[in-house]
Amino acid sequence: MITQITNRQWLIALAFIICHLSFSSCQGDWDDPSLTEPPFGNSSITDEGIISIADLKAQYPNVFASTDQNKQITENIKIRGRVTGNDLGSNIYKQFILQDETGAIIVAVNQTGMHGFLAEGQEIVIDLKDLYIGGYRKQPEIGQPYNGTSIGRMNKELFQNHFKYVGTPDASLAEPVQLTANELKNWDKDANCGKLIKLMNVSFVPVDGLGTFAPDTTIDKTVSLIGGCVNRAINELSESQFVVRTSTYAKFAARKLPYDDVNKQPLKCNLTGIATRFNNTWQLLIRKESDIEVLGN
């Protein structure tokens, strides 16, 4: 019995040590004097040649104007921005969003769990030389070619060699642009796609079935999946103008759409997320459940 207890204690202690070491390797915890540089990224990248995200888009307009194109970046240029969205809530998959004062862009990487080293509010520099820029249905992305002419994810080893940290994460600096539905109607998609927004005082169109953001289709037969996601409309905009797009893998997928069951009417809410585009339709990608703020009737 003593040996069994000792073995159990040893296993618990070993698990604690492994967990502690894994946690210590996360971004921002670089106070260990034995660490001479961050455990992720490429600290040898310099700040020379940094341009704004708006200037980057302006240099490659043709790859966004048409459907699914890409072009290799051959200039020695870099962008610097702050992470405004990642895969923490499992509604953004194998990509994160980088934003500066001028615009935003998706960075596609064939890696999961990126929120572990690219938290919301983390500022980074990306060395763009030899990476590819393209547009997936007019949404600008940084990555690698996919199916020849389209844009897809770069491998994770390549990405690690092309970015460096600037300071430590500060989520308070990843502030959304507050918009009403009417303001969103006239928002410039070319300039603003990819930005973090907070859509104010809107309500969801009631739906049949379970009435959740993205239900399990084996249970709720009323839902049609589009690329593993469910699009939900709001009352204040037409579905051709705007949808809330949620993956069935999102941690909040089973949450009920804000609705007053007593008075049988939708509840007003504020929705925070990444405003991507699919051709000329805005698609809001809610990052995590706390991005859903229910206001009431």
Image (cartoon, grey):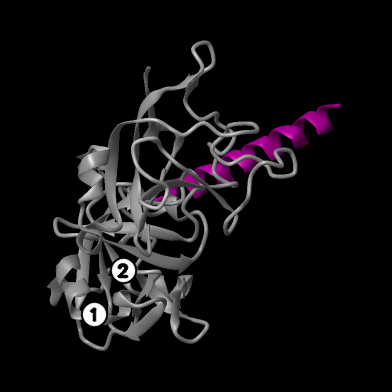
Secondary structure mainly formed by the magenta segment: helix
The Cα–Cα distance between marks 2 and 1, rounded to whole angstroms, is: 21 Å
Question: Where residue 133 sits: x, y (%)?
Answer: 33, 77
Q: Residue 163 carries which label?
A: 2
Three-letter amino acid code of the residue under disc 1: Tyr
Q: Quadrant location of the N terminus?
A: top right
In the depicted structure, whether residue 111 falls above or below residue 234: below
Q: Which amino acid does label 2 sit on?
A: Phe
Answer few, some or many: residues within 10 Å of disc 1's Cα (few below 14, many 20 plus, some between 14 and 19): some
User: Which residue is pictured at 40% across the width and 69% down the height?
Assistant: 137
The first of marks 2 and 1 along the sequence is 1
Q: Left or right? Give the position of 24 relative to 216.
A: left
**Magenta segment, which residues?**
1-27
Q: In which quarter of the image is residue 164?
A: bottom left
The quarter of the image holding the C terminus is top left
Identify the residue at horizontal 35%, vertical 78% (top origin).
Answer: 66
Question: Number of numbered discs present?
Answer: 2
Q: Name the residue under label 1.
A: 60
Q: Name above or below for residue 110 compared with residue 18.
A: below
Question: Is residue 139 toward the left or the right of residue 263 in the image?
Answer: left
